[in-house]
Amino acid sequence: MKALHFLFFFCTCACVYSQYNVSEGVTLMEEGQRMEEEGNYNSAELLFDSAAVIFNNAEEYNLYVEAVSFRLDMMAQSQKYNEAISISEKLILEYSSLISGDKRLIAISHNAIGLNYVGSQASISKGVSYLNQAMAAARLLSNSERLKRKIAFNIAGAFYYQAHYDSAIRLFQEIIESSNKNKLLESKCLLAIGNCYWGLGRLNKASFHYDESLLLLHSMKEVDSLAIGKTLHSKGYIFMDSNKLEDALNTFKSAANYLSSSLPQIHPHAVWIYGDVGRAYNALEQYDSALIYLQKALKANVYDFEKMDYHENPKLTNVNDVFQQFMILKLKGEALSGKYLKVPLEKDLQTLYNTYDLADQQVDEIRMGLSSSDQSNLGYYSEELYFKAIRDYIRIYEKYGDPAILEKIHFFFEKQSITRVQLRFLEVIAKSSNILPEEIANKEALLISKLERVKTKILKQKSDKGDSLQILETTRFELEQSLDSLLIRIKNKYPKYHQTKYNFKPVSLKTIQEKLKNLTQKTGVVSSYTSGETLYTSLITKDTAVFLSQKTDERLEEVVSEFRKEILEQKPIENSKSNDLLYDYLFGRISLILDTQKIETLVIARSPSLQLFPFELLHENKFLFEKFNISYHYSSTIFADEEIKGLKTANSDYLGLAPDFSSITTDTLLYNEQYGNLPGAKIEIESISSILRGQVLTDQLATEEEFRKHSSDAGIIHLATHAVIDELSPEASFLQMSKTDTVQKKDGKLHFFEIYNLNLNAQLVTLSACNTGFGKIQKGEGVMSLSRAFAYAGVPATVVSLWPASDKSTPELMKHFYQNLKDGQAKDVALNNARKQYLATAKGKARHPFYWGGFVLIGDNSPIEEDANLLVWVIPGVLVIVMILTVYRRKRKSKVAPEV
């Protein structure tokens, strides 16, 4: 304690008496680095902060940036991520030009900034970009082995958070080999490797590395309580996953003893360990004990909050780590729910409501501070909160039957469905409000456009490991940094616009039911979501709201995979085991309600794993599409929100595109084969043009440039082309257009991220290509398909394929579909009738669902609206024709008038 008092005294004296003594600041930085080596991060942070004050006063800004960067590094070690990110944003805004001209400053500052973004777990992609730039700069410096090792450790940590466990393990092992027997560093690497094996589910390997880390720590001269506590903490998860709950509880408690002896009262490590003691007590159903520790966790995370009565919750102010806050509130909600189900006390129920509501509000606050690309990272973690709330509220409703709780269940059903698509709709609404000046909106659009072009160039050169690729990566990073800086300014200067962009308000049950009452067809809104081995289902009709949870004996992902396989291999599916299981799980418990209420149309929202097959093909006595018209939505809120639907102007002009593939070879990193010609594609789009007015682009006219030129004015877009789906890197997926310029590498690939940034006004886009509704499942986001990219571009409805489209049957199916649309049928009805019309004449193997069942409608199912402007021309035209006919008839009568 005396040493710490001396440290504060020393720092204060340095600031007061040596404000302009640069050498004193350098000495402070050296002492801070020594303390960092010893793992004394709090003391090191104080020293770096004091050095920064000296350098700032002396106007030595290079040294100032360096000292602040070292401080940010220490803050990350103490998990003060949110405070550090706030400082980082100011550093980026004020000193970006200074940093960009100094390789050492780039390496040091970008490493610290990147570490905090990664550590926050909500901005991992941004953090990785900073860390990669830091490493690229460090490699150009001499005598930078220690710095490169530090950056490498942080990059390996980012790999861990991205679930790239094998890459992380290799990098941590390399760091151990170059650590010069630094026991503290080796123990940290062994702990990190153990965490990676835990992520891989290899619990024995994980436990071995934790034990090796503990052996090293106990062999050190001075006991590092913090490091030992962190390692024991991780080992507790091995026992949790092995269902050895008492061992887990004892290990977490032991870790808490080590950590509490070396940490201040407010500290993220204390929050986590108290929270996990509470987690273990929850698993043991000892809810009173769980609530004691979870209240301790809240105290360790919120300044000026001292309440140990678990009925008290802190406000969402003065929170040290906002990410941990909603996680602890989630655990507290679980404990309160478990306690209430045993002994129903009204005070506990009200506290439960307040706890889950606060957790949700905390997630919303975090979401407002993230870029669009980082939203899915938050979704990965918030999804667990939403499903726990749904589960607990359903259990309470099933036991006690309080109808007031139905609205809360529905609320969390909707909140767990939030993805970048919903946020994109909100962004469009925000921009239509004209809160943001046009000049700033244009600047943002320009930066996004430049970034899009650089990303395209990077994808074209991704096999090149040379300098040109590094230059492009640096350009990409600088553009992303500029865009981040602009968004920070927008957030600060136009808070109302920023809030509107992220203010996702679920539509109430009452609003949905009112909408259903006004529809001409009796409609049911079905939501089916999986979490672990539990399936959650909701059914909303104009008179009913039903919410169900059920355990699935089989993993639904595996059943879906088997069902898809049977379709692709053209096996009978009507009475297959996979069909029977899926039908029973998804509709077995609601089919009676659907039949009793004579429901004709289903609007379906689904978990990502359930988005890979058409519900239409489920069979019990008849196919589901023979009983219902079916469309899919990202959530029932988007289905019912009239403001979102009102964003589109009525336009029914048709644009069809069928490229030529004779001179195109696919990217050898994805495939190594020649594109097959699609002779039916040209027939397909031309037959549609005989139904709808508009234009077609075929052969060499069907280029990416021509598509961009005409697509923004089209109301209906039909693309009959090849799609290449990259499951490992969804952004690399693309639609193939005609190749135009070999020299400039204009290969006609319209990539996923390029589609995201299109400004489309179409009511409908049909992707008549293979697998356009298929893609990588990204937790917290969904299936990263090309259909999702068009939804993000503002298209309210897409028709996509869930497997390779047949070049023979697709033109016939599509001709029926568009004729039905022309006749005024709703989109889902038009597609459903098209299937029936196709089957009316199909024979032999062409009747198998593989040939006609792969296309599904995602989004708005209302009929195509005719362009109101068309009436401006049609009505006068009709009047002119009537006038001409009238004059003609009068003249004719005058010529043939009978004689008197």
Image (cartoon, rainbow, N blue to C red):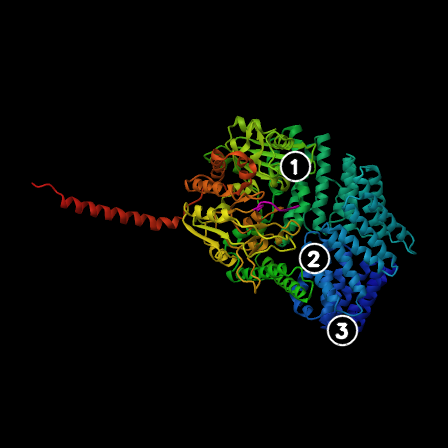
Mark 3 secondary-structure assignment: loop
Give left or right: position of 473 versus 500: right
Residues rendered magenta in the picture? 770-781
The mark lying in front, picked from 1 and 3, is 1
Residue 289: give x, y in percent of width and height. Answer: 79, 37
- Disc 3: which residue: 20
- Amino acid beneath label 2: Gly
Do we see residue 408 in this rendering? no
Count of numbered circles on the image? 3
Q: How far apart are marks 1 and 2 (CA)?
A: 38 Å
Is residue 777 rendered magenta in the image? Answer: yes
Give the crowd class for mark 1: few <14, some 14-19, many >=20 residues within 10 Å. Answer: some
Q: Depth check: give the residue in front, 653 or 796.
A: 653
Label for residue 443? none
Q: In which quarter of the image is residue 203?
A: top right
In this picture, residue 308 sits left or right of residue 847:
right
Q: Which residue in the protein does label 2 denote?
A: 127
Choose the circle earlier in sequence order: 1 or 2: 2
Determine which residue is flagged by label 1: 562
Q: What type is the residue that disc 3 sits on? A: Tyr
For the N terminus, the image quarter is: bottom right
